[in-house]
Image: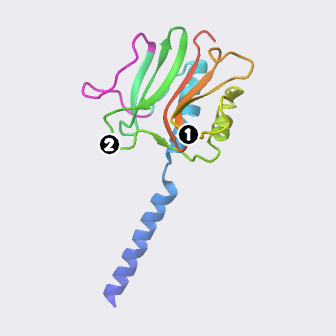
């Protein structure tokens, strides 16, 4: 009888731990959304340093190649070195880029919900600027997709670019003129 009580208690504890992890898991979709809305888009528009509260600075043995000619910027390794974030001013543009590293054993893409991806990220970007996607849906991939100002050339103003395929985003780049 005592062993049955221990087994029931252990089973309930295991169920509680499983439920805790299942309900508190952070999806890659959430991570990508936070990168855009909490870090990259605010940075390219007004300049507060992104990623100050997350990740770590790359070390000597980390396999990351910084973009040359960047001023007033920085780099951070994110999510157990799955991705590297770099930001700064380059050629008159303020940019924030997150791309995969080659050092990670984890997947080097953001696994995202493919259904409604374009509309979902258009809505996420909308509070920062009324940008319009250059495609309605991801049908194949990987391919570059972008969100641009409806009344501007693709090389003007705030813009967001991603390399994506249905269900996966490999990199994200937000760019705006440095003088705005």
Image point 30% across, 28% down: which residue? 63
Residue 55 at what x, y percent from top left?
40, 34
Q: Which quadrant is the N terminus positioned in?
A: bottom left
47 lies left or right of 132: left
Number of on-image labels: 2
Asked whether 46 or 152 is in front, the reply is 152
138 lies left or right of 79: right
Rendered image: mark on residue 140: 1
Q: In which quarter of the image is residue 94?
A: top right
Residue 53 at what x, y percent from top left?
45, 33
Residue 49 shows up from this direction: no
Asked whether 180 or 64 is in front, the reply is 64
> Is disc 2 surrounded by few (<14), some (14 to 19) or many (20+) residues within 10 Å?
few
Image point 62% across, 48% down: which residue? 115
Going from N to C along the chain, the mark reached first, 1 or 2, is 2
Rendered image: mark on residue 157: none
Q: What element carries label 1?
A: loop
Residue 102 at what x, y percent from top left?
33, 33
Q: Mark 2 points at which residue?
A: 105
Identify the residue at the far front of this view.
140
Image point 63% across, 20% down: which residue? 158
**Main secondary-structure element of the magenta-colored stretch:** loop
Q: What segment carries the magenta color?
A: 54-72
Q: Is residue 56 magenta?
A: yes
Image point 31% across, 85% down: which residue? 3
> Is disc 1 surrounded by few (<14), some (14 to 19) or many (20+) residues within 10 Å?
few
Residue 28 at what x, y percent from top left?
49, 44
91 w.r.t. 171: above or below: above
């Amino acid at each position: 009888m005592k062993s049955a009580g221990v087994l029931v208690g252990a089973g309930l504890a295991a169920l509680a731990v499983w439920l805790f992890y299942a309900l508190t898991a952070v999806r890659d979709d959430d991570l990508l959304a936070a990168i855009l809305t909490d870090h990259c888009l605010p940075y390219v528009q007004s300049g507060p340093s992104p990623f100050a509260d997350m990740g770590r600075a790359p070390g000597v043995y980390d396999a990351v190649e910084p973009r040359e000619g960047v001023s007033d910027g920085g780099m951070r390794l994110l999510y157990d070195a799955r991705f590297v974030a770099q930001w700064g001013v380059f050629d008159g543009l303020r940019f924030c880029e997150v791309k995969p590293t080659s050092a990670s054993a984890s997947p080097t893409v953001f696994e995202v919900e493919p259904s409604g991806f374009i509309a979902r990220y258009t809505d996420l970007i909308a509070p920062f600027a009324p940008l319009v996607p250059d495609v309605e849906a991801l049908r194949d991939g990987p391919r570059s997709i972008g969100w641009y100002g409806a009344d501007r050339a693709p090389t003007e103003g705030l813009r967001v670019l991603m390399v994506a395929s249905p269900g996966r985003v490999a990199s994200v780049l937000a760019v705006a003129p440095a003088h705005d």
